[in-house]
Image: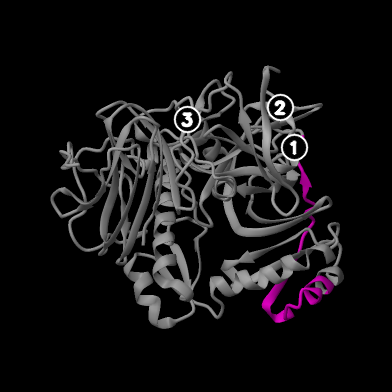
Amino acid sequence: MNRVLAGAAAAILLPAGLTTALIAMPAGAAPSGPTPVAPAGEAASAEMLAAMQRDLGLTASAARTRIASDAHASRTELALRKQLGSAFGGAWLTADAKSLIVAVTDSGRSAEVAAAGATPVLVSRSAGQLDTIKARLDAAAAKAPATSVPGWYVDVKNNTVTVQARGGTTAAKAFIKAGGVDAKQVRIETTNEQPRLLYDVRGGDAYYIGGGRCSVGFSVNGGFVTAGHCGSTGSSTTGFNRVAQGTFQGSSFPGNDYAWVSVNANWTPQPWVNNYSGGNVIVAGSTVAAVGAAICRSGSTTGWRCGTVQAYNQTVNYAEGSVSGLTRTNACAEPGDSGGSWLSGQQAQGVTSGGSGNCTSGGTTYFQPVNEILSAYGRTLTTSGGGGTTPPTTPPTGCTGYEFSVNGSLASGGNAYQPNNSYYYSSAAGSHRACLDGPAGTDFDLYLQKWSGGAWTAVASGTTPTADESVTYSGTSGYYRWRVHAYSGSGGYALGYTNP
C-alpha cells in the first residue's frame, strides 16, 4: 500500500549543552531544525536535580549538564561496544565525568576510540573474558559464605574481577579456588559491607502482599515490575490504598531478583515514578547508563537519593542466596526503600534489590537492571514516547528480543519518532531491525528514515494493511530514526528495534 510520508522532512537538533570534549561528532552534516522535545539536560525533574545537587555536590546548571553528558557517553559506549567487538574491554567515566575511558585489548583499535571522542586505554582482558571469569565464580556461588564473601563483580576500571572479603581474606581465597579461577585473574577487596534485602521498602507507590509491603518498580504493559523477593508467583497484591490490585505472574529469587505483577481493570499503568514531593518523574525509555554516570532512586523511607553507577554484573551473596547480574551503586538506601525505581535522567535503570549501610553514614545499594526483567517476561516499559501516556485497555505485548523497546500511543493520522522524538547514530554499516505491534483492528505503519544531510528520507518501510509491521534494512553508517504512523485507527503500540 502506497502511503504519503507526511512530515518526512522534519528535523531534530542535538541536545543543548553538549560539548565536543566528550565525543566528536561524525563527519557530515548532523540533523538540525526545531526540536520537539526538551534537551536532555532539562529532562530531570526538579526533585531529581535537587537530590543530585545535595548528594553529588553539583550546582543546578552542573546537574543538568551532567545528565546530558552522561546520556551522550552512554550512547557512545554502546556504539563502541558493537564496533570493537571482542577487542572491547569495558568503559567508564572519569571521576569528574568529563571524559569517557574505553579499554581495548588491541592497540590497533585505539584510533577508533579516539575518533569517537573517547580516551583509549590498553588492557590485557576483554569484557568477554572478564564475564567468563565471573561466570565461573557464579557457578561456585553456593561455596561462598554470605557473612565473609558479600559479593563479586566485573571491575572494568581495574580490568579484573573483584571479590569482596569481610573479616579476612581466607574465605574469599577458598571461594576463588573452588570456582576454578586463577588467583591472578581476580582482585580481593576487603570491605565492611554486609548486604541484606530491603523488605520494608517502596520506591514508587507502595503495594502490599499479605502482611508485607514492597514498592512498584516501573509500569509495563499489563502491570508493573518489581523485586522477586517481594512475592512468589500467584501471590495477590493490594495497592497503596489497600484496594485489590493484582497477582504475581512471575517471580525469580535467588539467582535473580525480579518479578512482574499483572493488575486488574481498576489500575492503569502510567509512565511515571512518584517523587514523594507531590509530583511525578516521567519515564521516557530504558537506555543503560555508563559506569560512572549519575543515577537517582526513589524510596519511601529516604526519598530521592543519588550517586553514581560503580559496576555492572555484580553477584551479591545474600544470606538467602546469591543474586547475579546486579548493578552496584554508591547511592544510599534504608529499610523501606527496597523495590524502588532507579533512573538516570528520564531513563529507567532498574529496581532496588538490597544493600548495606544507611543514608547517615553512606552505603552501597544494588539494583536489578530493568531491561533484563522486560526481556525475561516479554514486557514493554510504559513510557512517555509517541505522543501519549495512557496505554490501551489491552496493551500490545509483541516485539520482544530486541535491543531497545518503547511504548506509546497515537491518534488516527498521528506520527511518532523514536527514539524519544530524536534519532540515533550508527557508526558502522549493518542491519537495522524493528518490529511494530499496534492495537488490534487498526492500520499502523513503520518507516526507517535516514538523514541525507538536508532532510530525512525513508529508506525502508512496513506498510501492510494491518496493525503489525516488521522492517529489516542493511545500511551504511549515519543518522537514523524510526517513524510510527497511525494510518487508520488509534491506540497504543510497542516498538522493538536493534541497530548496528
Residue type, mark 3 in image: Ala
Residue 47 in the magenta stretch? The answer is no
Which residue is rendered at x = 33% and y = 35% of the image? 38
| Labels 1 and 2 touching (C-beta < 8 A) | yes
Which residue is rendered at x = 42% and y = 50% of the image? 71
Left or right position of 98 against 219: left
> Residues under labels 1 and 3: Cα distance?
33 Å
> Quadrant where the N terminus lies?
top left
Magenta residue span:
174-199
Image mark for residue 101: none
Which residue is rendered at x = 35% and y = 34% of the image? 386
> Quadrant where the C terminus lies?
bottom left
> Residues under labels 3 and 2: Cα distance?
31 Å
Residue type, mark 2 in image: Thr
Q: Is residue 34 above or below residue 14?
A: above
Which residue is rendered at x = 53% and y = 40% of the image? 52
Image mark for residue 46: 3
Image mark for residue 231: 1
Residue type, mark 1 in image: Gly
